[in-house]
Image: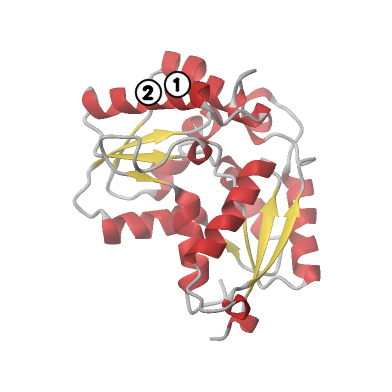
Amino acid sequence: MSNEEKVIGVLGGMGPEATASFYMKVIKETKVTKDQDHFRTIIDSNPKIPDRTQAILYDGPSPVSEMIKTANNLKLAGATVAVMPCITAHYFYEDIQKEVDIPLHHVLKGLNKYIDEECSGVQKIGVLSTTATKNTRLFETHLHNKEVVYPNDFEQEHKVMQAIYGKNGIKQGNTGQHPKALLMEVAERLIKEEGCELIIGGCTEVELVLNATDLSVPFIDPMRVAARDLTRSEKIG
């Protein structure tokens, strides 16, 4: 397969910085010797898509129609496969895929395959995600034969969600020490008290402040796995 046969479409804006970060992952995961070896990548960063957590938990506006429109924009622009750099958005995956006739890469299915291949001995996995992702059991649905552990209710709302959505949080443009400290505190408790052997950045904002050197067990960024899958697979989807 040549690079010209696959054009990667990024259904972005959820949030914008996570979208930009994902594009850098695509670049870094592509094996190249010159500019022309990179994949053509079309990004529609649409921050007007309604918030996924608000829609799932609090009866906020549905993001589905705007996500479908954005995905179809990518197809019209020439994308042959699309991807959403937002984990919570995968709650709506089926609703979007049935209305879009290019493949929509499923980040969590790809993550499950990666863990089976690269971390087969791991049994207990800690997940730092939005409350919507936690409550809809997205990781339990797609990570097979693994025990998924989330922060307790207090940690989830007062630390993880504050790190993501709070007034000094990542979605406010703060990728500094404040959100990082909150997430590291929760992650280390999951490791030390719950016995988690692996931590997953279950929200695309989490990987903007945490990385593999921060924790005492391996840390996996699902969007880096997705970038790896999209740039190395021989299949269009």
72 vs 4, nearest the viewer: 4
The amino acid on which the numbered mark 1 sits, given as a three-letter code, is: Leu
Residue shown at 38%/29% (left/top)? 150
Task: Find the distance from the CA under tag 1 to the CA under tag 2.
Answer: 7 Å
Secondary structure of the residue carrying tag 1 is helix
Q: Is residue 148 visible?
A: yes
Whole-percent x and y of residue 26? 55, 62
Q: Quadrant of the C terminus?
A: bottom right
Q: Residues within 10 Å of mark 1 (few under 14, many from 20)?
A: some
Q: How is the image coloured?
A: secondary structure
Whole-percent x and y of residue 94? 61, 54
Residue shown at 48%/64% (left/top)? 29
Q: Residues within 10 Å of mark 2 (few under 14, many from 20)?
A: many
Question: Is residue 141 shown above or below 160?
Answer: below
Residue shown at 30%/26% (left/top)? 188
Q: For the image shown, how many numbered marks are present on the structure? A: 2
Secondary structure of the residue carrying tag 2 is helix
Instruction: Return the residue at label 2.
Output: 186
144 vs 167, nearest the viewer: 167
For the residues labelled 1 and 2, say whether their Cβ atoms are less than 8 Å apart: yes
Query: Is residue 16 shown left or right of residue 143?
Result: right
- Quadrant assignment, res 89: top right
Whole-percent x and y of residue 107? 50, 54
Residue extending furthest bottom? Answer: 1
Q: Is residue 151 visible?
A: no
Q: Which mark is residue 182?
A: 1
The amino acid on which the numbered mark 2 sits, given as a three-letter code, is: Val
Question: Is residue 111 shown above or below 127?
Answer: below
85 vs 16, nearest the viewer: 16
Whole-percent x and y of residue 222? 46, 50
